[in-house]
Amino acid sequence: MITMNPPTPSRIQVRPGNPNEGRQDYISIRDFGFWYGDKKALDAISVAIPERQVVAFIGPSGCGKSTLLRNLNRMNDLIDGIRHEGEITINGRSIYDPGLEVISLRRRVGMVFQKSNPFPKSIFENVVYALRVVGVKDRALLEEACETSLRKAALWDEVKDRLEDSALGLSGGQMQRLCIARAIANRPEILLMDEPCSALDPIATGKIEELIHELKAQFTIVIVTHSMQQAARVSDRTAFFYLGKLIEYDKTEKVFMNPSQAQTEAYISGRFG
Amino acid sequence: MALPDQDSATPRGEPWVWFSSLGLIVGLVMVLGLLGLVLMNGLSVFWAPPVPVVRLDDGTSLIGQLAQRRIRPGSPASAPRYERQYQVGLRELNGHSYVWVDESRVRAEEFPADILGLERMENGPAFVRPVRLTRADGRVVEAADPAFAEALAAEVAAGAGVRERLTEINRGRIGEVNAAMEQTRVDLRRAEDQKTPTEAIRRAMTALEARYATLGSEANQIKATGETSKLLAREAGGREVVVPMAQVVREWFPNRLGFADRLGLFFRRLGEFIFGEPREANTEGGLMPAIFGTLVMTVFMSLLVTPFGVIAAIYLREYAQQGSLLRIVRISVNNLAGVPSIVFGVFGLGFFVYVLGGSIDQLFFSDQLKYNNNTPVFGTGGLLWCSLTLALMTLPVVIVATEEALAAVPRGMREASLATGASKWQTIREILLPASAPGILTGVILAMARGAGEVAPLMLVGVVKLAPTLPLDGTAPFLHLDRKFMHLGFHVYDLGFQSPDSDAARPMVFATTLLLIVLVVCLNLGAITIRNRLRARYKTASF
Amino acid sequence: MQRFFHDELRQLRDDLILMGERSLDMTRLVLRAVEARDDALALQVRGMDDRVDELEKRVDREIMRYLTLFGPMGSDVRLLLAARDIGHDLERIADEASVIAKRSLVISERGPLKDLLHVPEEGIIACEVLRLALDSFIEGDLAKARLVLERDAEIDALNRRNYEQLFGKSGDAAKVSASHVELIFISKALERIGDHSKNIAEQVIFLLSGEDVRHAR
């Protein structure tokens, strides 16, 4: 981050740092290893993700970046024959703590997927789904949460007159923003994004990226992306993975301008493989 | 190596395209042929063609409606000889309704306008030349009188009224008295057994018996008034026959009808067939009880099989530990679909009727058993056991369809739900089941189609040739699970193989088959409509 | 759609403008120092150079950061490329001002000059041209940028006249006082400032129209 004392009152700060700088190791991954059956997918990963920042995971396909992301809300638990070692803590608490229900973990860690996957329900019901599952019945509360989430997801103005319409009638970009609204409706602390723009056109992608930029004021965001440009645009820190190993993790500018590892340099400059 | 000329090479394997399409064509032709045959034979029953007087070479003649024409068995193929079958009716005179006539013996066919066709309550139809009608009030109308047709129609209508009143007394009021007497008799026996006072019960019984006698005589009186009206007619041979008008259901002059009249008659007969009650050992009249029984049984079966099948499939797909044990279970379930249906019937009889039904009777209807000559309630065939047996038989279909529908729900939707913190059950209830509803309904449609057409197991667990009451009616508890009922499929079997007059039953077999097909198609169309609506609502996202 | 990172381009522009204003300030102040023989002012001007150098480094960092992270296209690319050159030219202008300040101090050390030749006039025009170049960038005014290209010749002419006046009068370099030699250096520096202003104008033309007018003659 560029530090300076502004000569004139600057309209914006470059990369606004968080006014109340949060924990630097809000999500802490320590010596984390992961196996699908006998296949080792991750090897001794250590990453500290600061609070209310955007961290991008990049790397070629099969490098383990998605696997790591899906471990942060234990979505990998759905798969048979998995095993892990090491530790992941969120705000100091282990996500593998036997006293922590995986359901309550997922309520604190929202997720947006590569393919937008709205439920075959109305837009309203999609957004408030997370509240419905915890038993919220108060209509006024649900409506308020719906509006708040859709506004945060920059979708409110586009859908406010058709909340009862099927969510499947939205465009691809709108669907993905709806999924983001759904993921933040129950006010999680962390938002995981697994290639959220890979199926979208540039305009929709731009909107989602703007949204990520807005959302990081409130959420800690971890995004997996195949697009290095995207990682460069939206993230504060970037982690480069290769073959299940963490090659480099640093501030995004450092990684893209002057990486310390030759492999990272080769990957970001397109001289890989 | 030289490559073959790529430009002129014809595509390889092209004949196989034709071959595979041929397979489809053969299949379609067979299905269409079946439908056509059933449609032709089934609908021709209701058509009233002109009826000739046929003069034969030996000087005799007959009046009859042409039923069919065929090559005489044993005649050479090069010079085939034909024979015709005429429906002559008047079974009480001839002992049969149909005669075969070698075509070479037919000298002439005339179509006199005065030939009268009659459908009767007993002894089948009749084709006669009327002479005179004695009306209920004693007036006599000659056949030559221009008012004859009108008077005849009036008498038929009056006869219908008489029959209606009789039915109302016999089935309605006398039926009620009978049921009350039955119950009173049970009460009496119980009272005797338990040494409680029987006086009141005996008095009630006497009152009921008196009422029974009154109703009986009332019925006889009505019957007697109807019998004064008679039609004197002559058959082809000149023999006279007297037809009581109370017996006549419908009359028509086949050689006087225009096309529109014939069409009207056709639809009236079709209507009676669908909405009427059966008569003459089911060979005539309508099929309402059978249609209704089939419908109620099929719907009830679907209501039973759907929750069971869906719950089982959810467990198999979503909760059970996937392993070799589960694979064996799955194979077994699939194989269950291939078990002959009669085996299910035997199981239904052995387990549902005797074990389950017997236990229910022991537990809840022990009074009934003890004081009513061991007459079982649930310990015998009935609607519940039929539906359960067929539900069991169609269970694999629903399980397999539901499992596949669940598996077809996009993984992303499941993950999205879990990622918001929903539990597995919430995911199933809120997301998976709605999304797989069309697939589940497909399974239910298949189950219904199979269940509606099944006969063999039903014969063992509760379908009868003639049921006096419907399984669903206006008296509490409205749906009578213990009642025996009639079924179209069984009706076809009964007509085709158990009928005393096979010639008379033959057209009805086709008509009933047609009705069964229509019913199954209607049930399926209904289910498909629901499914398509669901599909439109729950179509999965794609872009 | 306005993207969040477009704000950084505005920041870059602001920094460049600030740099330009500072360079212009330095030129004006140093000219006043020369005319008024104000050594304190000259010293102050020399001290101002560091800030401009720092600004140049900041602008360069911003350009590099933007190029690396945000994949610019179209006019954004031209802005970044032009900004790099403009920043460089402005830094050079500030350097030249600093050189003038140094020469001015030398002159005062050796004793004041009565005749400043055409230097004050040349300075006024140099400031005008630089102002014009800066305005063309700030306002995105193509006409002003083209005007800079024309007016640069005036400075060149005055510089030549200064030279000729000094050497042409005596015809003998030995007779020229050392102070006057310093004055020639100042004149030369002002001529360089004019050249840098011209370069800036050329970059502005490139930025606005995409046309490359360098070395056109």
Image (cartoon, rainbow, N blue to C red):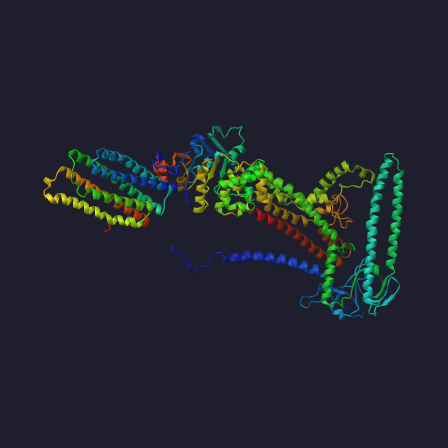
Q: Is residue B90 left or right of residue C98?
A: right
Q: Is residue A253 left or right of residue B438?
A: left
The answer to which image quadrant residue B132 occupies is bottom right
In the shown orientation, is residue A52 left or right of residue C137? right
Observer-nearest of B176 and C22: C22
Horizontal and vertical percent for residue B489?
A: 71, 51
User: Is residue B455 something one can see in this rendering?
Assistant: no
Question: Which residue is located at x 86 percent, y 58 percent?
Answer: B226
Say which of C94 and A82 sits in front. C94
Number of marks present in the image shown: 0
* Residue B230 spot, x, y in % from top left: 86, 62
Can residue C126 be seen here? The reply is yes
Question: Relative to C171, does residue B124 appear above or below in the rendering?
Answer: below
Q: Nearer the viewer, residue A166 or B246?
A: A166
* Most foreground residue, A105 or B218: A105
Query: Which quadrant of the rendered structure holds the N terminus of chain A?
Result: top left
Image: C181 above or below B276: above
Which image quarter holds the C terminus of chain A?
top left
Q: Is residue C72 left or right of residue A165?
A: left
Q: Where is residue C201 shown, x and y percent of the image?
A: 28, 47
Q: What percent of the width, then of the height, locates residue A220?
A: 46, 35
Q: Is residue B121 above or below residue B382?
A: below
